[in-house]
Image (spheres, rainbow, N blue to C red):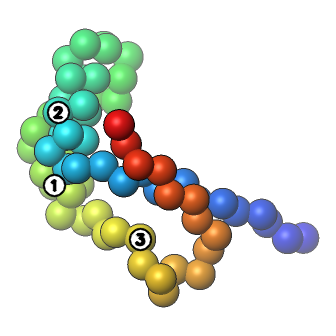
Amino acid sequence: MTNNVLFHVVLCDMDVAKQRVLKRTQENPDALFIDKNIFDALLKQWESWSDEDKFPVVFHKSK
């Protein structure tokens, strides 16, 4: 059986991403709780998409 996988990568300034995540956490009690410390810890583990990644990908630029 073949799995068809297509990754979507959102290109966004990290400061903008952080503001959006913190705002969503503050305004929506049902949202996944991510505060500044959690965002910063997760950011340390983030890797940008590489040409070495052998999966199909679609890039989207954030507004």
Residue drawn at x 28%, y 23% is 24
Q: Is residue 6 left or right of residue 33?
A: right
- For the image shown, how many numbered marks are present on the structure? 3
The local secondary structure at tag 1 comes to helix
Position in image of residue 11 (x %, y %): 36, 54
- Mark 3, other Cα within 10 Å: few <14 / some 14–19 / many ≥20: few
The local secondary structure at tag 3 comes to loop
Please state which of residues 24 and 62 is positioned toward the viewer in this rendering.
62
Residue drawn at x 42%, y 78% is 50
Q: Is residue 39 left or right of residue 50?
A: left
Of the numbered discs 1 and 2, the one sitting upstream in the chain is 2
Q: Amino acid at mark 3?
A: Trp
- Camera-near label (1 vs 3) is 3
Q: CA distance from mark 2 to mark 3?
A: 22 Å
- Camera-near label (1 vs 2) is 2
Position in image of residue 35 (x %, y %): 15, 34
Q: In the image as oriented, which residue stretches furthest toward the left?
A: 37
- 31 is higher (above) or lower (below) than 17: above
For mark 3, what is the residue? 49
Q: Amino acid at mark 2?
A: Gln
Please state which of residues 17 and 1 is positioned toward the viewer in this rendering.
17
Of the numbered discs 2 and 3, the one sitting upstream in the chain is 2
For mark 2, what is the residue? 19
Quarter of the figure with residue 8 = bottom right
For mark 1, what is the residue? 41
